[in-house]
Amino acid sequence: MIRLRFFQHSPARTLSALMIGAMLCACSGEAGNLVTLADASDARDTVRPAGSREAIVNSTPRGTLDSRDLTQRVLVRPRPPKIIADDFSTLTDALTYAARSATGDAERVRGARWTEAAQIGLLFGSPEGKAFLSGKQGRALVRGEPAQSCPMLNVALAPTDEQATDGAMRACLNQTASLTDCGCRLIARGDHLLAKRDDFAYAIGVGTTVIDPARGGAMTYASEERVVEGRPGARHVWLLDVSGPVGLLQVEADGRAAMTINATGERFNGTHKADGFRRGRTARRAYLTAPDGRNVIVLVGFEDAEFKENRAQLTAWNPYGSLVLKKAEAE
């Protein structure tokens, strides 16, 4: 069973996020200029289905949906099948099960109902969900299993659902290959949702805590995460207070991270790690250093209770080490 621990916001934090959410439109136009990471790749990451020359979309270039996307309906079942591939050796069985489960006969299942896609938080709110809804032919959405500790979400678009499922599963398995106890679960295919509706929860906003011991401890902000167009796996996390954007954290798929502070222009560079999903949003830790040597920890998306229970671990300086050391050890 997938166990999701729900991220909860205080009323004040939620209100702040709602008040300043509209300001993000102005932020997005500057997003590419605020943080610069050396050697960042602009190449679009694609995967291809077995036996097909058609490229599958494995990035999320779209940030909005048109009216046709929003009027779609998807089939929700009370007891959906669990279609999971633990590794590439079990992929064929998972694909066969998917082909049997996501068919027109599924709507005859007792309790199955067609629901407007706009009511499904993960599809309507996340970049990957929006990309899924934008697919006009074959499409599939795959998430790491278990979701709490395996922060992968892969969308694939292709000429057929079979090809999209194959591509999304392979993309996810490539990501989980270096992880322990992580598999890949197909949660949506075509017009069918293949997980319970609760598994498609998506938080409107998340909280971010910046721990800066040299400047007086921890500061908490509302935040909003956005995809970096043309750079698969990269994200911008805006730090927000009631007056607007305070700073910007950028995280890259290869583990690099950088942050800039609006008021002072300070810039930090370092590494980050994704810790898993909390209500459809990725919880992250970033370990950053300023040019003067000051260390800062940025925690994105951790609920208050989780932070209190694991405070010592979450506030410890970079238990993962530098990317340079990790690469050296791997070689």
Image (cartoon, rainbow, N blue to C red):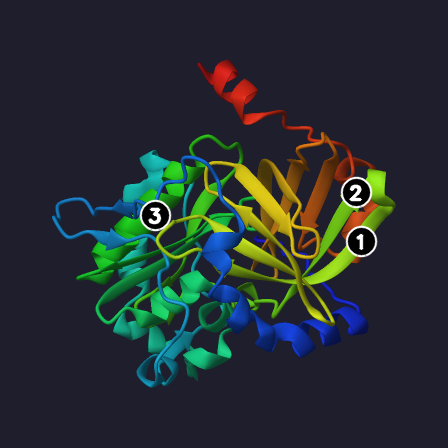
Along the viewing direction, whichever of 313 and 322 lies nearer the viewer: 322
Residue 313: x and y in percent read: 77, 36
Say which residue appears at 69% left-offset and 31% top-offset: 318
Q: Residue furthest right?
A: 216
Whether 78 is drawn above or below 61: the answer is below
Whether 135 is drawn above or below 251: the answer is below
According to the image, label 3 marks what residue? 169
Q: Callout 1: helix, strand or loop?
A: strand
CB atoms at circles 2 and 1 under 8 Å apart?
yes
Say which residue appears at 67% left-offset and 45% top-offset: 266
* Real-space CA distance between mark 2 and mark 1, rounded to the nearest whole angstrom: 8 Å
* Picture disc at residue 130: none
* Picture disc at residue 219: 1
Q: Callout 3: helix, strand or loop?
A: helix
Amino acid carrying label 2: it is Asp
Left or right of 162, for residue 233 = right
* Residue 94 in view of the camera: yes
According to the image, label 2 marks what residue? 212
Amino acid carrying label 1: it is Met
Q: Earlier in the sequence, mark 2 or mark 3?
A: 3
Quarter in which the C terminus is drawn: top left
Amino acid carrying label 3: it is Met
Whether 133 is drawn above or below 6: the answer is below
* Real-space CA distance between mark 3 and mark 1, rounded to the nearest whole angstrom: 39 Å
Say which residue appears at 34% left-offset and 48% top-offset: 169
Residue 248: x and y in percent read: 60, 54
Along the viewing direction, whichever of 116 and 45 lies nearer the viewer: 45
Residue 303: x and y in percent read: 74, 56
Query: Nearer the viewer's eye, disc 2 or disc 3?
Result: 2
Left or right of 237, for residue 62 = left
